[in-house]
Image: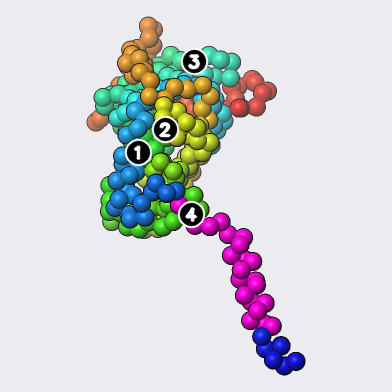
Amino acid sequence: MSTHRRTAVPLLGVVAAVALAGCRPPRTPPPDLSLDPAALREQVLHAEGRVRSVQGEARVGVDAPGGSGTVKQFIAAERPDRLHLEVLDFFGNVAVVLAAGDGRFALYDGREKVYYRGAATPENLARLVPLRLRAEELVAILCGDAPLVDGAPAAAAPGPGYVTLDLARGALTQSLRIGPGAVIERSSRRIDGAPGPGTYDVAFDDFEPHAGVRFPRSVALRSDSPKVKIDLRWGTMEVNGAPDPALFRLAPPRGARVVDLDAGQAARGAPSSPFGVPAGSDAPAG
């Protein structure tokens, strides 16, 4: 009897360990992905070039200090830095139009009849997208990519259906979840391991085949400094089409007041956020 009691406890431990192991998804990465960090980074860089443009309608929800709500947008983005965002208000009228390309920026606030123009700086783009991103970063995210940190590949680890890739440049680090086809599914930027200015998380979901690539129908962007949440859900869209070049140029409409925002010149005013329910409306945003 004593011998039985001595062997029963270890046996139960083995059974429990096997049971717990069975609850975890197996670490089986996609067979087309390398587990060498440098080689995997090259695979990701190659995959990024597959989507050159996207345009279509989307629902965009924003939760930010300057305003919160959900609006319908027409969006066109073309690498490296061409961007067109057209925001409709609750009643279907054009509220704000932003166009950027070749380093220039223009924004027309149809509610106030004011036209802003200047360089396509993160500060100017943040007049509509409430997060300071370079035009190239914003276009890449709309094209289904997370802009990569220009740093050394530090580590790669297998996961259930993906591989985690870590990049580092000094105090700035980026952790990526790479799925089949070397497509980025998640990205997290940190400075000294913590969130801060210039860091953000982006997650792509609801992947579908478009133009021969896995393209995400949903995008979630998160920042802690400032505290911003942006959720985009594509409706009808076209991947790798040929957007009209006129979309990325915006002339001042007749009768609009023109405000210059060029470098070295103080900004005179800024458009109010188009996100939220218009005054006098009882309907919920979104």
- Find residue 7 and name its label: none
Mark 3, residue position? 94
Q: Amino acid at mark 1?
A: Ala
| In front of the other: 99 or 181 | 181
| The quarter of the displayed image where residue 282 is located | top right
Mark 4, residue position? 28
Mark 1, residue position? 47
Residue numbers of the magenta segment: 8-29
Placement of 243 over or under 233, stated as above or below? above
Can you give x and y, in whole percent of width and height, for residue 213 in the image? Answer: 42, 32
Counting residues from the start of the chain, the first of labels 4 and 2 encountered is 4
Most frequent secondary structure within the magenta stretch: helix
Examine the structure image and report whether residue 20 is included in the region drawn in magenta. Answer: yes
Can you give x and y, in whole percent of width and height, for residue 199 in the image? Answer: 39, 47
Mark 2, residue position? 213
Q: Amino acid at mark 2?
A: Val
In the image, what residue occupies the spot 66% across and 23% down? Answer: 283
Q: Quick check: marks 4 and 2 in contact, CB under 8 Å?
A: no
Q: CA distance from mark 3 to mark 4?
A: 48 Å
Q: Quick check: marks 1 and 2 in contact, CB under 8 Å?
A: yes
102 to the left or right of 7: left
Classed neighbour count for the residue bearing mark 1: other residues with Cα under 10 Å, few (<14), some (14–19), many (≥20)? some
Q: Amino acid at mark 3?
A: Val
In the image, what residue occupies the spot 48% across and 54% down? Answer: 28
Q: Quick check: marks 1 and 4 in contact, CB under 8 Å?
A: no
Residue 103 visible, this angle: yes
Counting residues from the start of the chain, the first of labels 2 and 3 encountered is 3
